[in-house]
Image (cartoon, rainbow, N blue to C red):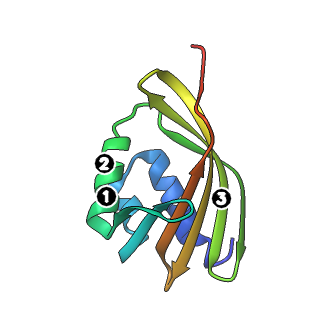
Amino acid sequence: MNAVEQPVALQLEAYNRRDIDAFMSVWAEDCQYFAFPSTLLASGLAEVRERHVVRFNEPDLHGRLIGRMSVGNVVVDQEVVTRNFPEGLGEIDVIAIYEVVDGKIAKAWFTMGEPRLLGR
């Protein structure tokens, strides 16, 4: 793993532990969080934290990394995320694009497929 990928890897590990403090430790103070391509969902640490505190309450939350690549200071992850949707337990395909500046995630863009419910 190269240096630019490290904060992205750490935030995914913290996401899977639902450890909000560890998760937030790799985000820049003035970070921005987008729905791809340009819908701003959260700006700054407080707003990014607020989005994830709620999500971290989901008992089955888990992001499974399918692949990761980086070019320059941009990291792209392909993941399958297990979520507790209102309709039930399911998973969703996610592409996450991170811009890393000075060892912190400065900007992130997310695009998602359609949720697939899992029969349990």
Q: Residues within 10 Å of mark 2 (few under 14, many from 20)?
A: some
17 w.r.t. 117: above or below: below
Q: Which mark is residue 49?
A: 1
Looking at the rendered structure, the kind of residue marked 2 is Val
Of residue 19 and residue 63, the one placed in the foreground of this image is 63
Name the residue tied to disc 2: 53
* Secondary structure under the numbered disc 3 in the rendered image: strand
- Residue plotted at (32% across, 70% down): 44
Q: Earlier in the sequence, mark 3 or mark 2?
A: 2
Name the outermost residue toward the front: 38
What crowding class fits label 3: few (fewer than 14 Cα within 10 Å), some (14-19), or many (20 or more)? many
What is the number of the mark on residue 102? none
* Callout 2 secondary element: helix
Separation (CA) of disc 2 from disc 1: 6 Å
Q: Considering depth in this image, is 116 or 84 the residue closer to the camera?
A: 116
Residue matched to label 3: 77
Which image quadrant is residue 120 in? top right
The spot of residue 2 in percent (x, y) is 67, 76
- Measured from the top left, where is residue 66 in percent x and y? 72, 49
Amino acid at dot 3? Asp
Q: Are marks 2 and 1 in contact (CB under 8 Å)?
A: yes
Give the secondary structure at mark 1. Answer: helix
How many labels were placed on the picture? 3
Q: Is residue 35 above or below residue 75?
A: above
